[in-house]
Amino acid sequence: MSQTSSFSLPIGPVHVALEEPVYFHLDVDGETVRKVEITSGHVHRGMEGMATQRNFFKNTTLTERVCSLCSNSHSLTYCMAVENVLGMTPPPRAQYLRVLAEETKRVASHLFNIAIFAHNVGFKSLFLHIMEVRENMQDVKETIYGNRMNLSANCIGGVKFDMDDSLTMYMLERLDTVEEAVKRVEKVFRTDPLIAKRSRGVGVLSREDAWALGVVGPVARGSGLDIDVRKNTPYLVYPDLYFDIVKEQDGDVWSRAMVRVREVFESIRLLRQCLDKLPDGPLAVHMERIPESESVARSEAPRGELIYYLQTNGTDTPARLKWRVPSYMNWEALTVMMKDCQLADIPVIVNSIDPCVSCTER
């Protein structure tokens, strides 16, 4: 007669889902997780302190290195915070170009996350296929911005890059390729029994728990919440563009993955609109002397709501710069998602929130 054993089990800090330091202490009953405690704080880069030792221009570069997948969102939101202090509005062409960079990064980020999901469940051929599709967006970034990860697209008052007809045609061709490929990926996610077995009903976060925990981004939308800064608090030219908030209702791993798959199509839709509507005009406005003040800026990064708080003191360096990243809000939801799950499901569940340790423990 078998007897179920209960014991404590440490998971991490290395390779829970990604090669970043994440540590969990679990109370386990056989193969079933009964209680989850998250221990964070392994990474201390002191970036918020470094920001007070650099001038406003240098901090555009610094903030872009908070995270790789969300890098453009950090520099964008920082620039918007500075512009709010100055009462500055970037030119219309610059705003469209900023959206272009943001949505390009969003497509690449979402494809990377669903590829890692395929890797975690052992679907190696799907993992390799999605990463191959993602290379189209990496090529777009390298061709237009000169970089595959940190685009260096934003500056205070506007952008540092421009689009011409040849780049526009190149991007449209790549978007067509990605769209057709992701349609096939979506079909696999909807029909493959392996994906259903490893993700349907796994890591469930109910709508009520999602609301109570204040989760953001695809994690919130995967639980049926209408949360998207681009719609709720529009910025740049998003009010002039048409796109839908993608939601799923089941709140499980599959729902969060499917939100990201479907959001790829919405981002491609936004990119085509930007290329079609791109107005003529300057790329930036002149930056004035920064007064003593404070401001807040928000954006919808690939992982969810990103907030920057800036306090100035009349000098060329910030008195305080602080950011709140989406992973910080989504982190605690793992204690709900992982309760009563199987040990083998932990990497899949952790990856489903698309965690960024370097963002959270800055």
Image (tube, helix red, strand yellow):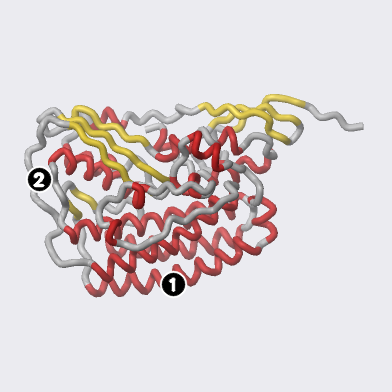
| Relative side of 270 to 320, left or right | right
User: Residue 303 in the image: x percent, y percent?
Assistant: 43, 46
Q: Which residue is depicted at the point 38% across and 66% down?
A: 269
Residue type at tag 1: Thr
The one of 13 and 264 positioned closer to us in this rendering: 264
* Residue corresponding to mark 1: 177
Q: Residue furthest right?
A: 1
Q: Quadrant of the C terminus?
A: top left
Alpha-carbon distance for marks 1 and 2?
Answer: 39 Å
- Say whether disc 1 or disc 2 marks the residue closer to the N-terminus: 1
User: Residue 48 in the image: x percent, y percent?
Assistant: 29, 31
Q: Is residue 301 above or below residue 132?
A: above
Q: Work out whether residue 21 can be spotted.
A: no
Residue type at tag 2: Met
Label at residue 32: none
User: Residue 63 in the image: x percent, y percent?
Assistant: 28, 40
* Residue corresponding to mark 2: 287
User: Residue 286 in the image: x percent, y percent?
Assistant: 8, 49
The one of 240 and 275 positioned closer to us in this rendering: 240
Q: Is residue 263 above or below residue 319?
A: below
Element type where label 2 sits in the image = loop
For the image, the number of numbered tags is 2
How crowded is the residue under tag 2: few (<14 C-alpha within 10 Å), some, or many (20+)? few
Question: Answer yes or no: do the residues labelled 1 and 2 have beta carbons within 8 Å?
Answer: no
Q: Which residue is depicted at the point 47% across and 56% down?
A: 246
| Relative side of 344 to 148, left or right | right
Q: Work out whether residue 337 can be spotted.
A: yes
Q: Quadrant of the N terminus?
A: top right
Element type where label 1 sits in the image = helix
Q: Which residue is depicted at the point 66% across and 62% down?
A: 192
